[in-house]
Each structure stands twice: as structure tokens, then as C-alpha cells.
Image (cartoon, grey):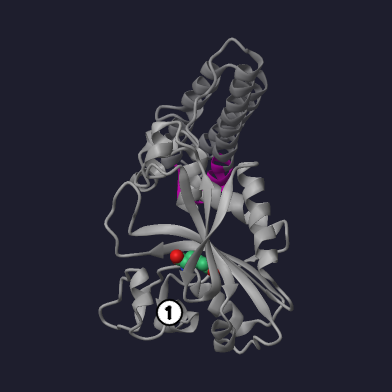
Amino acid sequence: MQNIFFHYILYMQEKIFREIEEIRKSIQKINTKDIKEIEEFHVKYLGKKGKFSKLFKSFRKLLPYQKKQLGESINQLKKQAKEISSKLKEEKVTTFQEGILEDFTKPGISCIIGRRHPISTMKHTIINLFEAIGFITVEGPEIEDDWHNFTALNFPDHHPSRDMQDTFFIEKNPDLLLRTHTSSVQIRYMENHRPPIRILSPGRVYRNEAITARSHCMFHQIEGLYVNKGVSFTNLKQTIHYFINELFGSVRYRFRPSYFPFTEPSAEVDVYCGLESEIDRSITKGTGWLEVMGCGMVDPHVLQNVDIDPENFSGFAFGIGIERIALLLYKIEDIRFYFDNDIRFLKQF
Ligand code: DAH
């Protein structure tokens, strides 16, 4: 009996070695560019009815210690065959792609790639312009407290100036609110840094306003602040002039006296869009002018609130509406388009 088993094992071993040899030979023969041949190889050896399944079937008949002897080599061989099969498949994929690149008459592989949102593009363009003249970018929280959003910026308690910006308060804590402007970041930064200060702070702001073609309850601003010794209104005008010229080329713009609690004197800047097209007329409400930012000299009270001596230092600040600038540059007549996420709109940028 033992002899029969012994012969059987020898026979099996020999069979396996022959298989190994056969696989090796087949591998050498295989043409990597022929997808069919690769698939056939896979089915022939690794498929359900492939050589390995058959091998394992006969293997099951062996005694445990014999299994131990042979199992390893069968498994190794199977692993090898699997590796070869996947390597061939990988190579096939690359040669297939190369084939497309070589043959210019074949249609390309189409793929849909994402792109930046126009507001995001605008934000980065503006940031780049100011970073080029030494401003750094800092950010602050969108949920603010009363001090940073109002009080420190010289909005006295119960003062009508607070009504300039319709605020969303957090119900559970009336001291907390959704920031109405990015000016709050001025305070946060000045609380922790001493002049010279040159910062930009971009971000989302919220106001309890009706959603129409021209206003939204959520929009984006970029705040700018420069505090140093001897900063003057002339410096502010130079900076705004640089910004507008870089962004719009040589357009007409004007400083219009205005009021903000945190700046004195204050101004708003309007850019002339003209009245030629329907869009120009609608975004400028028929005046030809569109307001793009507020600005002014930092009120001495604001500096005092953050322990910067207004006798020694002065500063200017500005707040740019990103949607407004994009409206003007891209000629978009409705602010709601920005937030609808309609792919037909977004695809244009
Ligand atoms: N915070 C103002 C607003 O949201 C915009 C603004 C005006 C910012 C004048 C400033 C500034 O820094 O100096 O309406």
C-alpha cells in the first residue's frame, strides 16, 4: 500500500513540476499586447476549471503529511501565476493607453474635471494683489461674539449704527451671532499683534436680508487693515488706486464720503460700469456706478479698544464685497447664481 502512495506522490510531484515548467514556458510565450492571450492564460491556470483547481482536487486525496510536503509548492506556484497574470494586465493597460496617445485619429478619453468657484477665483485674485504689496492673510471665526463684531469696532450698545447690518443672533446665547462683516478679524488680530500690521481677512459673512438679485443673506468679504506710524488717507487712496487699476485696468472710480462706526473719515468706492448693456443698467440700478468697497481711517477708539496708542499709530481699513467685484468683472446680473450650484453657470468660469 505504502508503495502505491509513494508512487502517487512521486507522480504528483512530477506532475506539479511539469506544470511549473509549462507555466514558465507559457509566460515566456505570452504576448503582452494581446489582451485575449492574457485572459486565456488567466482562465487556463487560475479559472474555476483551470489547472490549479484540478491540481487541488487531486491534492485533497493525499495524506496530511504529504499535503504538507506539496501544499507549499502548489501555493507558491499559484501565487506566482497570479502575480504574472496581474502584471500582464497592468502592462496591457499602459500599452493600451500608449496606443491611444500614439494614434491621433482616435477620440480622446473624456473626463469631467472640477474647477474653482468664481467667488473663490475672485478671492484668490484679490489676495494675490494685496500679498504682492506686503499684506498677509489671516482668518477668523464665522460665529462671533458681540465684542469683536460690534463693540470693539465702536458700535455702542443700543446705538442705531447696529441696525446698519441686520444680524442673525444665536438664540441660546444673545452674545453670539453670525458675523455681519469680516471687520471682526481686525480686532482679533490687533488684540494679539502690535504694529506694523498689514492684514487681509477673507471670509463668509451673514445678514438677515431678503434674497434678491442684488442681496443675499450670506456673502463674502475681504477686509484689509494697515496700522503703522504716520499712516494717512493718502496711503489709503494709493492702495485703493493700485488695487482698482490692477484688477479693472484704467476704469473710472470715485471715493464717496460715507459713514462707518469704526472709521473716521469714511468713504465708499464706486466703479463706473457704464450704461451700455442691460446687465450694466441692472447691476448699477441705472446709475452706471457700482459700490465695491467701504474704507476709511481707523477710528482712534478702535485702536484704544485693542491697546494700541492712537497718539503713536494710525491706520486705514477697507472692506471689499467679493460678489460685487465678480458681478462687475464677469458681468453677472444676479447674485443668486453664485449659490445655486447650477453646473451650467459654474461651467463658464
Ligand atoms: N464692514 C463694512 C461692511 O461690512 C465694510 C467696511 C467699511 C470695512 C469700511 C472696513 C471699512 O474696514 O474701513 O459694510
- Establish if 131 lies above or below 52: below
Residue found farthest to the top: 105
User: What segment carries the magenta color?
Assistant: 62-75
Q: Residue shown at 54%/48% (left/top)?
A: 122
Q: Which residue is mark 1?
A: 150
Say if residue 321 shows up in the picture. no
Q: Position of residue 199 (x, y in %)?
A: 63, 68
Q: Residues within 10 Å of mark 1 (few under 14, many from 20)?
A: many
Amino acid type at image mark 1: Phe
| In the displayed structure image, the side of residue 277 where residue 129 appears, left or right | right
- Which sits in the foreground, 31 or 320? 320
Give the residue drawn at x 65%, y 64%.
236
Say which residue appears at 43% left-offset and 79% top-offset. Answer: 150
In the shown orientation, is residue 195 left or right of residue 115? right
Instruction: Classify 71 as above or below 8.
Output: below
In front: 70, or 163?
163
State left or right for residue 143 relative to residue 185: left
Q: Is 187 contained in the magenta span?
A: no
